[in-house]
Amino acid sequence: MQEAQQLRSGLVEVGTTSYTVRQEAYKFGTDDLVAEATIVIVAINRDGKSVPVPEERMTAIPRWPRGG
């Protein structure tokens, strides 16, 4: 049986062609951290070449709290 989890996600850093998102999963209704991840996403075009991160990406994802 799987337990419900609560996911917290936010933008940590934005570079020219990539951005970093942090995620934490908690046991639902508690402060028990059960998983965490830091993900680097690179913006690419149809040819697979890196391109500047689109402005809408930088505003669509909430910022990770500083020191959090």
Image (cartoon, grey):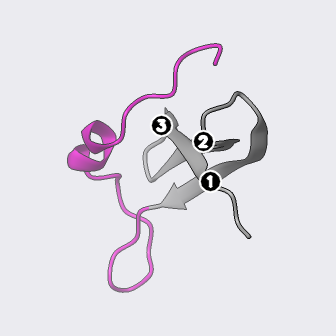
Where residue 45 sits: x, y (%)? 34, 75
Q: Give the residue number, with chain letter if any, for mark 2.
A: 22
Where residue 54 sits: x, y (%)? 26, 52
Q: Quadrant of the N terminus?
A: bottom right
Tag shown at residue 11: 3
- Quick one: 50 or 20, which is closer to the camera? 20
Spatial distance from mark 2 to mark 3, Cα to Cα? 6 Å
Disc 2 secondary structure class: strand
Q: Give the residue number, with chain letter if any, for mark 1.
A: 39
Q: Quadrant of residue 43?
A: bottom left
Residue 17 visible from this viewpoint: yes
35 to 48, vertically: above or below: above
* Residue 34 falls inside the magenta stretch: no
- Quick one: 1 or 61, which is closer to the camera? 1
Spatial distance from mark 1 to mark 3, Cα to Cα? 10 Å
Does the CB distance between marks 1 and 2 fall below 8 Å? yes
Disc 3 secondary structure class: strand
Toward the front, the furthest residue is: 1
Q: Quadrant of residue 22?
A: top right
Q: Quadrant of the C terminus?
A: top right
Toward the top, the furthest residue is: 67
Toward the left, the furthest residue is: 56
Label 3 crowd bin: few (<14), some (14–19), many (20+), radius 10 Å: many
Q: Which residues are magenta?
A: 43-68
